[in-house]
Amino acid sequence: MLTKSIMILLICSLVYSEWRWADDTISFTMDKRAHMGISSGLYFMFRHKEYTELQSIKYTFYFGLGKELVDAILPYEKYGDWGGDGFSKYDLYYDVLGIGVAVLIDKWWKPKEDSKWERGFSTTGISIYYRLD
């Protein structure tokens, strides 16, 4: 269902708007770092909210694709921060790279069940400490 909705959105955006392509490069600029970092973070958010690995990958990619569609049809000159400079395939490359890095970290870095290392998260910070038993 989600895939069909995205395809309909893509077709409508091509038919009813002026499509723009971004004039960018594959250089690791701040924009590309943001795409990579946000994709990694979204994957972890979905993954640790009880979505399957495949669902987390798909939804994170769809989010990145949606952002590129918005960039393609809403010019930043008219819409400010909501718009973009056009559809960038390189942004999608970095989205996929961020998802890949997150999947690898998620598979390789598992906490030990009987670990003396503990971590805590709160609204004011993160704490990591070692239990002396």
Image: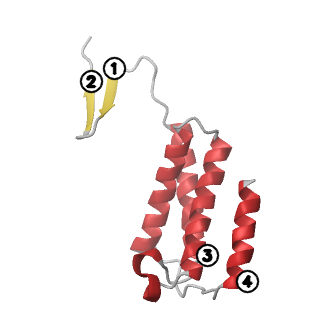
Decide: marks 2, 1 in contact (CB < 8 A)? Answer: yes
Decide: marks 3, 2 in contact (CB < 8 A)? Answer: no
Q: In terms of sequence position, does the residue under pointer 2 or pointer 4 come before the other?
A: 4
On the image, which quarter does residue 133 sit in? top left
Up-down relation of residue 117 to residue 69 (above or below): above
Identify which residue is drawn at 54% across, 66% down: 94
Residue lying farthest to the front in this orientation: 16
Identify which residue is drawn at 65% across, 85% down: 17
Q: In terms of sequence position, does the residue under pointer 3 or pointer 1 come before the other?
A: 3
Q: Amino acid at mark 4?
A: Val
Residue 130's mark?
2
Up-down relation of residue 23 to residue 109 (above or below): below
Q: Amino acid at mark 1?
A: Lys
Identify which residue is drawn at 26% across, 28% down: 129
- Report, in whole angstroms, how far the alpha carbon at label 3 lies from the one at label 2: 44 Å
State the image coordinates of residue 125 (x, y, percent, origin top left).
24, 40
State the image coordinates of residue 4 (x, y, percent, origin top left).
77, 60
Q: In terms of sequence position, does the residue under pointer 3 or pointer 2 come before the other?
A: 3
Decide: marks 3, 4 in contact (CB < 8 A)? Answer: no
101 or 67: nearer the viewer: 67
Please give the residue where the numbered disc 3 appears in the rendered image.
89
Q: Circle 3 — which element?
A: helix
- Report, in whole angstroms, how far the alpha carbon at label 3 lies from the one at label 1: 44 Å
Q: Residues within 10 Å of mark 3 (few under 14, many from 20)?
A: some
- Report, in whole angstroms, how far the alpha carbon at label 3 lies from the one at label 4: 20 Å
- Report, in whole angstroms, how far the alpha carbon at label 2 lies from the one at label 1: 6 Å
Please give the residue where the numbered disc 4 appears in the rendered image.
15
Residue 116's mark?
1
